Structure formats: structure tokens, C-alpha cells
Amino acid sequence: MSATATVRDLRNRFPQVRKLVELEGEVVVTEQGTPAYRLTRYSPPDRRKPAPPKDYLTRLRRHQPRPISAAAAKALHDANRGER
């Protein structure tokens, strides 16, 4: 069971509440008799290695295994260009 403290305890006797957090690991703060907050010790986030860079060429080859021919590229360009 975790220790409890009131909002008034936090305001008036914080050093004792801090010691409770250090000993118990968690303190439930009550407000007007009902549990309202939970105080726990801060633990820094894990320092994970950054993700490897994306290999866009491999992804492109997965979706388009073979490149289009020069004639097909020109036809596509001309179709997209319209009558400009």
C-alpha cells in the first residue's frame, strides 16, 4: 500500500512528503479525503540509439522493381505537360 498525504501536507511539510516518496516510491495525495494525485520519483527516459537512416533507394526498388524506359518517361512527361 502506498503512503498518503494531503494537499496541505504538500504545502506545509513538503520535506517529509519527499522522504515518503523516496522510501515508499509512491505517495497518493488526497484532496478533501479523496485520492486526487499520485507522486512518484522521476526516472529519466531511456537513451535509445537513434533509428538508422531510411534507405529510400531500396524502398523505391521495392515499389518499382525496374525503371521505366526513356520512351515511356518522355510519353509520361508529354502527357502530364498537356498543350503547354
Image (cartoon, rainbow, N blue to C red):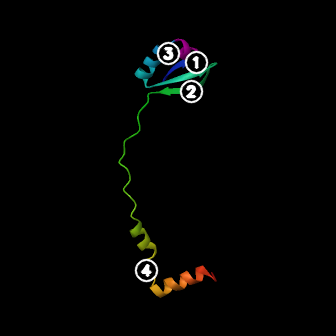
Which kind of residue does numbered mark 3 sit on?
Phe
For the point 58% across and 21% down, the residue is 30
Magenta part of the protein: which range? 8-12
Looking at the image, is 70 positioned above or below residue 51? Answer: below
Secondary element type, mark 3 = helix
Foreground label between 3 and 4: 4
Foreground label between 3 and 2: 3
For the point 59% across and 79% down, the residue is 80
Q: CA distance from mark 4 to mark 2?
A: 60 Å
Identify the image quadrant of the C terminus. bottom right
The circle on residue 7 is: 1
> Residue 81: x and y, percent?
59, 80
Which kind of residue does numbered mark 1 sit on?
Val
Which kind of residue does numbered mark 2 sit on?
Tyr
Label located before the other in sequence (1 or 2):
1
Say if the magenta span includes residue 10. yes
Describe residue 26's horizontal placement relative to residue 82 as left or right.
left
**Residue position for label 2:** 37
Q: CA distance from mark 3 to mark 4?
A: 68 Å
Label 1 close to label 4 by CB (< 8 Å): no
The circle on residue 67 is: 4
